[in-house]
Image (cartoon, rainbow, N blue to C red):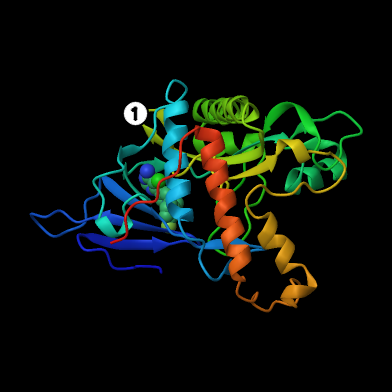
């Protein structure tokens, strides 16, 4: 359910798995320019396709996990959260009111383990985002230190392109560039310190910052499985692609003969069977419960 209409809010935008609204001023009926409502849906994507059906409670799990991380990171960086409770009942648990900020025009990525686009860059010339790496690294290798690997914010449906650090400096100025780099790396380090105790590795993460009075404010979602690669620590074995903590069953089924789907055909994937939906839901909840040490409770239905 996209739920484009929310009483008291103007729908602004829908991404593949989330929706953005502006609260309406009750006095004037016009959209406020100082706050937004971020709503996480239960939609899931894989191989760049939105899949069906939705994963029950995924939006709430990711929203609650992000809120928990904002608290864990509060001594490193202020965040955009206004309220997680002053939201419409039909999106309770999966929506957050936030301060509307001027966003940095950069996807701030840090990598602690080598895979994906970072691995492709390393294989080409031994560097990732301008940083020279040791020889002999392979898919899944831990990096000596997390590396800031920023990228462009591509329009929806297009892929983000790597940006050099000099391009980030040119886009936002050297002071904000340095703050964004240092904070992104610090967030991933803190994330991994906490996650390691719970058997999860965070290979890489993408964060978004707003600017307020010349300072950076952590916005959007943070250290969720949709913005980061979570790997089960006990299965970590460099040398091949690592299983995804959350989407392993989805990817395994979609690429198995059981789905009869060819991911390179351009055709839309078939609907996920119930057992894949149920096991995937359980993985999201397991990630939340392992990381936070709290039992996940779904909000009552409305
Ligand atoms: C985030 C996004 C979507 C959720 C804009 N605090 C902020 N101030 C200004 N803009 C944003 C934020 Cl978080 C902002 N996004 C990404 C899209 C649902 C988040 F559809 N876009």
- Horizontal side, residue 88 vs residue 95: left or right: left
Q: x%, y% of residue 259?
A: 72, 74
Which residue is at the front of the view, 36 or 177? 36
Residue at x 66% of width, y 47% of height: 245
Q: Is mark 1 within 8 Å of ligand 1?
A: no
- Horizontal side, residue 239 vs residue 47: left or right: right
Q: Is residue 73 placed above or below 157 in the rendered structure?
A: above
Residue at x 57% of width, y 33% of height: 169
Residue 49 visible in the current orientation? no
- Horizontal side, residue 300 vs residue 293: left or right: left
Q: x%, y% of residue 14?
A: 42, 63
Q: x%, y% of residue 155?
A: 53, 60
Q: Is residue 232 placed above or below 57 in the rendered structure?
A: above
Which quadrant of the figure has residue 275? bottom right
In the rendered view of the protein, which quadrant contains the N terminus? bottom left
Residue at x 85% of width, y 47% of height: 240
The residue singled out by tag 1 in the image is: 213
Residue 77 visible in the current orientation? yes
């Amino acid at each position: 359910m996209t739920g484009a209409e929310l009483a008291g809010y103007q729908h602004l935008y829908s991404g593949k798995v989330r929706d953005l609204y502006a609260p309406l001023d009750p006095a004037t009926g016009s959209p406020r320019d100082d706050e937004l409502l971020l709503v996480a849906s239960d939609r899931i994507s894989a191989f760049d396709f939105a899949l069906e059906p939705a994963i029950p409670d995924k939006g709430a799990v990711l929203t609650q996990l992000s809120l928990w991380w904002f608290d864990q990171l509060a001594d490193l960086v202020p965040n955009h959260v206004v309220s997680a409770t002053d939201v419409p009942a039909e999106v309770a648990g999966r929506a957050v009111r936030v301060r509307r900020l001027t966003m940095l025009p950069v996807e701030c990525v840090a990598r602690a383990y080598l895979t994906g686009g970072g691995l492709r860059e390393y294989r080409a010339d031994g560097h990732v985002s301008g940083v020279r790496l040791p020889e002999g690294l392979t898919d899944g290798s831990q990096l000596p230190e997390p590396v800031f690997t920023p990228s462009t914010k591509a329009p929806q449906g297009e892929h983000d392109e790597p940006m050099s650090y000099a391009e980030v400096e040119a886009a936002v100025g050297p002071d904000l560039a340095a703050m964004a780099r240092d904070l992104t790396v610090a967030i991933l380090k803190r994330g991994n310190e906490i996650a390691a105790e719970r058997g999860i590795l965070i290979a890489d993460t993408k964060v978004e910052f707003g600017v307020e009075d010349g300072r950076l404010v952590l916005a959007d979602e943070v250290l969720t499985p949709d913005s980061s690669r979570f790997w089960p620590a006990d299965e970590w074995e460099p040398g091949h692609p690592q299983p995804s903590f959350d989407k392993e069953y989805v990817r395994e089924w979609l690429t198995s003969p059981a789905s009869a789907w060819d991911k390179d055909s351009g055709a839309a994937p078939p609907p996920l069977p119930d057992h894949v939906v149920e096991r995937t839901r359980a993985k999201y909840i397991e990630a939340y419960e392992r990381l936070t040490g709290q039992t996940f409770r779904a909000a009552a239905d409305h």
